[in-house]
Amino acid sequence: MHELSVARNIIEIVEQNVPKGELSCVREVMLKVGEFSGVVADSLKFSYEIITADTELQNSELKIEAVPFRLRCNSCGGITTNSCGLRECADCLKTDTEVLSGEELKITEIILEDKS
């Protein structure tokens, strides 16, 4: 289950970017996960919950925004999508395409509880 190692990496990034004394204030970790990133969102959330249990991050939640797979065709200029992750334009069937979205896996925000 590679989602477990992805969850560990997310926690490491949070720990590197939030001051040590404020880790218990982390409420949400916002993540963008592309449709063809190779990550199963439910498994990632489960892994995150297991790893953060009984830690300073136990009250935090991993929020995942799914990003659809989209291509730009360099031949016809169309922007298309397909459910197979093929890098072929759905309009003209050419393979001279550029992936616009759908392969990302990135933390976009770490939300902390306001201490005041």
Image: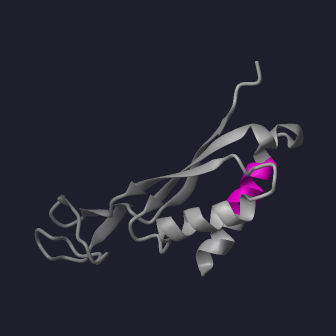
As drawn, the residue found furthest toward the front would be 54
Quadrant that contains the C terminus:
top right
Q: Nearer the viewer, residue 106 or 48?
A: 48
Residue 33 spot, x, y in % from top left? 47, 60
41 part of magenta stretch: no
Residue drawn at x 73%, y 51% is 58
14 part of magenta stretch: yes
Quadrant that contains the N terminus:
bottom right
Instruction: Identify the main secondary structure in magenta.
Output: helix
As drawn, the residue found furthest toward the top would be 116
Q: Is residue 10 left or right of residue 105?
A: right
Q: Is residue 33 left or right of residue 14?
A: left
Q: Nearer the viewer, residue 100 or 2?
A: 2
| The residue stretch that appears in magenta | 9-16
Residue 54 spot, x, y in % from top left? 80, 57
Residue drawn at x 88%, y 38% is 21
Residue 57 spot, x, y in % from top left? 75, 50
